[in-house]
Amino acid sequence: MLKPVKKRFDISIAEANKSVNKTFELDKNIKAVKGVLITSDKDDLLYFRGTQKIEINKEEFFPENYESKLLMSGVNVAPKQRYYDLGNVNPGNGLVKLTFTDTDDVRTPFVPYRVSLYLDCEMEDELS
Amino acid sequence: MREQVLITQVKITKAGQVNHFQVRLPKNSIRIIGIELGGRLIKKPKTDGTVGGTGNGAEAGTGNGTAEGTAGEVIPREQVFEKQMQREEIIRSLFPFKRIILIGELKLQSCEQANIFFASHFQLDENLGAGDYSQNQYWKANLFTHQIKAEEDIVIVDGDSTIIAGIFKDRLGELNKSDFEYIVNVYVWLEIQEEKTKGDKS
């Protein structure tokens, strides 16, 4: 039986105008990735300054320069609808690669911030 | 079949600038299924130009809002807009709605079809907090707190064309008579023929 789980992966952005690469590994019993969401501890910085590339199983889903604001959801969106729908992505080797780039925007001066990548997954129940 | 997005960056540096650009479609594209817009403000102008001058208002001013040796008198931004700001404050207090900020206009055309297939305003919603009574002096509705889920504008255009022609016209600088520097990202979502099946992405 497949059950829904949410996975969270964090990266820290310590310097302005830099890219941060990180590869995360999903659990072996995750069978599908259904959605993606990006948030931060400083939403304004992520909204105005962030762009990212996301690969799952070496397949590019969002290319470089894809703005973070397009993967964020505000409080006006119902919690159950906040994830960007990817369909049913086969996680394959389970590797999720996030390349996040911070770029200057005059509306938000830089301070260090955290970027959280949430994945809406379907996991195989070990008990069944 | 799977989806792919192409990102084209258009840089605007001058008021009223019209930027022509092209989006190259990959050979395996089947159709264009959506258009999305985003952007980043690089630099706000230091002055809003001249009043009563004959030259280019946006370029006549210097860093502190004064100009030298121009034909007309140059008035600092603060003085020019002081009265206007007072009027705006009064109007804002009377009406709960703010004017939406128009940044620019985008048009796209496929080389295989007549007429433009997509035309849109690129704008900022200033009324996100309308009717939200949870706001107070410490917490206000912002784009990054109240934005709805970003979704592309759906279009269905054949992917036979190798190139999409685009025009972006700046209106922000034109309306404010000043040079805003910003980047507009044009996202073209495509349906493409997959070469080999890797996953189950729909």
Image (cartoon, coloured by chain):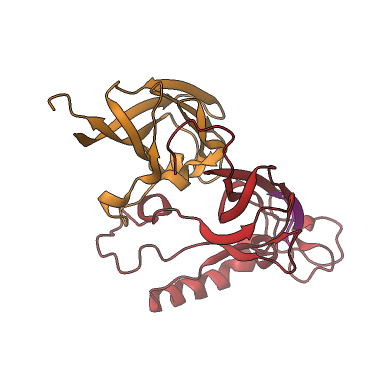
Chain colours: A orange, B red
Query: Which residue sits at x=82%, y=55%?
Result: B68
Query: On the rendered image, what quadrant is the C terminus of chain B found in?
Result: top left
Query: Can you say whether A49 is above or below B140 in the image?
Result: above
**Which range is magenta?**
B11-21
Query: Can you say whether B98 is above or below B124 in the image?
Result: below
Q: Quadrant of residue B66?
A: bottom right
Query: Which residue sits at x=29%, y=22%?
Result: A27
Query: Can you say whether B89 is above or below B195 in the image?
Result: below
Query: Which residue sits at x=43%, y=21%?
Result: A23
Q: Quadrant of residue B35?
A: bottom right
Is residue A82 visible in this depiction of the protein? yes
Image coordinates for residue A52, horizontal then vertical, percent = 51, 34
Q: Quadrant of residue B116?
A: bottom right
Image coordinates for residue B55, horizontal then vertical, percent = 84, 64
* Horizontal relation, residue A27 to residue B185: left or right: left
- Can you name the residue that lies furthest to the left here? A127
* Horizontal relation, residue B66 to residue B97: left or right: right
